[in-house]
Image (spheres, grey):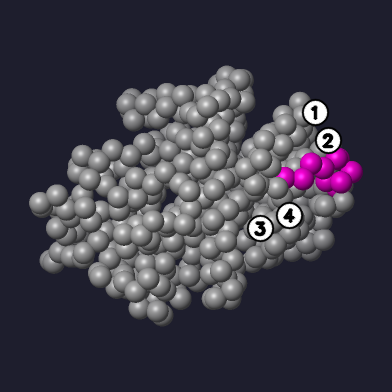
Amino acid sequence: MKVVVLGAGVVGVASAWYLARAGHEVTVVERREQAGLETSYANGGQISAGHAEPWASPAVVPRVLRWLGREDAPLLFRPRADWAQWAWGLRFLIECLPGRFERNVRELAALALYSRQCLLALRAETRLEYDLLTRGILHFCTGQRDFEALAVHAQAMRALGIERELKSAAECLAIEPALKDSEVAIVGGVYTPQDESGDAFKFTQRLARLAGEGGVKFMYQTTLEAIETAGGCVAGLRLVGGTQRLVAEAYVVSLGSYSRRVLAPLGIRVPIYPLKGYSITLPLGTRAAAAPSVSLTDEECKIVISRLGDRLRAAGTAELAGYDPSLNPVRGAAILQRVRRLFPAFAAVDGVEHWAGLRPATPSNVPVIGRTRLSNLFLNTGHGTLGWTLACGSAKALADLVDGRRPEVDFRFR
């Protein structure tokens, strides 16, 4: 049947791919001029199935209190006259309760492991190249208390089938020798050898190209004006400046942070709010030997660092500031300063690229996938910081739901 996917980020493109593989005639509508130019453009580069867990946890509450008033805090709440922001913040605190956190961890872990299987199969089929490194992720600590907490949590995650190897300081440096010159002492960490890293933008672009070659139609620079309904289903899409409606038999919303705005006029509420994340990208140049080759997560500053070919990407932090995508120089500078302390060889590097993007986050960090009250309207959105990690699994499950099949993963679909 004919299916329209709204949004050409990594989740939307993956949805189009799996829907097309299931035999559907797929059209993707995207307001930007290419695929992957929003949240997928310059993220941290991690495919972190071994670390797929929500920000909302019991341990984060005291940290949030300590971070209040700090412009460079890993999580920054910038109050606005916006009820959606305050409601999201309250629900975030509720999701930090132990029982809710454990439920959310189980769901994310199941979907992440399934998504990794789907990605491996897709890569074997397509031979996609996107600066892939299969050297795992090292989640390191620079404080003893953080390391002890990480060790306890690793044991709990192993019970869910996620292998996390506890490593001493010396073992961390053996895994990633580039940390030996760090000005900040490494006290220990957790290593997930099956995790990967790569360039999510390249992945999205190249998968979109393959999908196009396979028959998927991409309508770039096309903005949705409204979703028209009749008789309990979507009747068609009205496009800005268009003289004709776009009509299909099924519709999928994968519009990231903008999903909430598009769905609200239909009376469909989704608990999604934009969390602005920041990244910096440094050219390696002659410093390539001093750069890490294992993807890293810095527990203290909540940033991730990945080598992407001849570049080094560092990304992280979350800022609740509405739909403002502008760069806050203080937050970008804080990431750069941390990278330079961890890797002094990059202290004087020039040509640093700064970027900010809006992550579509639910308070629980669990994405919204499945049907709506409109019989032919489906959702695949709200992946937060785990968009690339969960993209293939959620897309394949979405294709199953559109076909009326039960997905292969244990997850609370709508």
Quadrant location of residue 333? top right
For residue 184, above or below residue 99: below
Query: Mark 4 near mark 1, Cβ–Cβ under 8 Å?
Result: no
Say which mark, if any, is on residue 144: 1
* Residue 278 placement (x, y as % from top left): 55, 44
Does the residue at mark 2 contact the one at mark 4 (Cβ under 8 Å)? no
Write down the residue under mark 4: 193
Marker disc for residue 187: 2
Q: Are the residues tagged 3 and 1 within 8 Å (C-beta)?
A: no
Compare residues 349 and 176 and report the one nearer the observer.
176
Q: Quadrant of the C terminus?
A: top left
Location of residue 289 (image quadrant): bottom right
Q: Indicate the position of residue 284 as horizontal and vertical percent values.
A: 73, 60
In the image, what residue type sits under mark 4? Pro
Give the residue furthest to the left: 231
> What is the distance, in whole Å, between disc 2 and disc 3 at their CAs?
23 Å
- Nearer to us of marks 2 and 4 is 4
Q: Which residues are magenta?
A: 164-173
